Image (spheres, coloured by chain):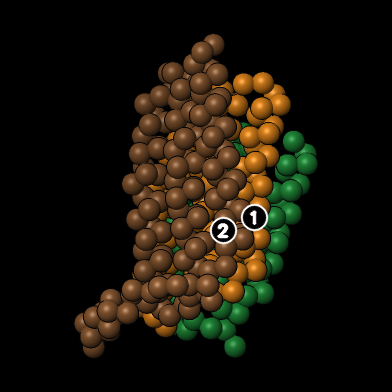
Chain colours: A green, B orange, C brown
């Protein structure tokens, strides 16, 4: 169990770092979507299904859609 | 299902998710990353149902139901953004 | 006992397909090949895994059937939208590609946009 949790946290850290590094903001949005996906799996394994459900619905769908609308209003590439 | 079978199944699904995430980290274009994220979300839905069976909790299936419905919105939003062509 | 063995076999086939889908997404040379592997293998594998769990636990069968139905409805549509969008945004095909019949589609959509 501790191995699984540490692997999930490591993957979350890698995804968050990738979201920080990417210059294309669409890639950063996709990486942050994956961060919330892995956080949802982590909450599920720690026996908190309601938190996992909220994280899945907000992180995977709503935040992605709102960020994409914001990118369309502004610029896609970071300097 | 015995303990070993559960371990083997979970290991295979976790390996699939890990390969999708590797493609997401090194994919050349944004479309590759979107495809990898969508595939990882679908594999995760199956993993959550299997884990709900291992934990023997009926309520845990709701999380996968929410996942199966809401992954669609994110993928369609990304696709609409790419199609407009910026 | 029979139901449990049957459900384990169905779940095992589904898990194998899920792993092959992940491997295809990692190994294929092109966006479109990756889409093909990631859509077909993953839809079949997720449906088989979820229905296998429903077979092993007969009280859960209807709910797992609903989840499998949602995946069967939404996953091909979203991946089709992704493939169409990546073709329209100009992602190139790989070198081994033999035929590409989307030229007329591209011209027609370009005229419509203008």
Q: Is residue C36 left or right of residue C81?
A: right
Q: Secondary structure at mark 1?
A: helix
Instruction: From the image, tell me which residue sits under label 1.
Output: B19
Tag 1 and tag 2 share a subunit: no
Q: Is residue B71 left or right of residue A9?
A: left
Asked whether the viewer can see residue B61, the reply is no
Q: Residue lying farthest top?
A: C1
Q: Quadrant of the N terminus of chain B?
A: top right
Q: Which chain hosts label 2?
A: C
Above or below, A75 against C87 in this view is below
Which residue is located at x 53 percent, y 31 percent?
A: C11
Residue C42 on image: x %, y %: 49, 47
Q: Secondary structure at mark 2?
A: helix
Residue A74 on image: x %, y %: 44, 82
Pick the front one: B57 or B16: B16
* Mark 1 Cα shell of 10 Å, populated few (<14), some (14-19), many (≥20): many
Instruction: From the image, tell me which residue sits under label 2.
Output: C25
Residue A49 on image: x %, y %: 54, 37
């Amino acid at each position: 169990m501790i191995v699984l949790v540490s692997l999930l946290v490591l993957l979350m850290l890698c995804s968050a770092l990738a979201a920080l590094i990417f210059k294309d903001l669409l890639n950063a949005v996709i990486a942050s979507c994956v961060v919330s996906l892995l956080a949802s799996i982590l909450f599920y394994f720690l026996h908190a299904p309601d938190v996992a459900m909220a994280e899945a619905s907000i992180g995977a769908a709503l935040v992605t859609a709102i960020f994409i609308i914001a990118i369309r209003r502004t610029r896609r590439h970071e300097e | 299902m015995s303990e070993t079978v559960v371990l083997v199944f979970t290991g295979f699904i976790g390996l699939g998710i890990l390969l999708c995430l590797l493609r997401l980290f090194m994919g050349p274009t944004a479309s590759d990353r979107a495809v990898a994220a969508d595939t990882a979300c679908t594999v995760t839905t199956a993993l959550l149902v299997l884990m709900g069976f291992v934990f023997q909790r009926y309520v845990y299936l709701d999380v996968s139901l929410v996942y199966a419905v809401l992954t669609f919105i994110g993928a369609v939003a990304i696709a609409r953004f790419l199609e407009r062509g910026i | 006992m029979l139901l449990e063995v049957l459900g384990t076999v169905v779940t095992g086939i589904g898990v194998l397909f899920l792993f092959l889908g992940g491997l295809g997404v990692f190994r294929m040379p092109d966006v479109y090949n990756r889409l093909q592997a990631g859509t077909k293998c993953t839809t079949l594998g997720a449906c088989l895994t979820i229905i296998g769990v429903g077979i092993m636990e007969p009280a859960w069968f209807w709910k797992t059937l609903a989840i499998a139905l949602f995946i069967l409805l939404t996953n091909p549509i979203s991946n089709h939208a992704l493939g169409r969008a990546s073709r329209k945004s100009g992602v190139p095909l790989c070198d081994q590609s033999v035929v590409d019949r989307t030229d007329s589609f591209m011209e027609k959509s370009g005229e419509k946009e203008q």
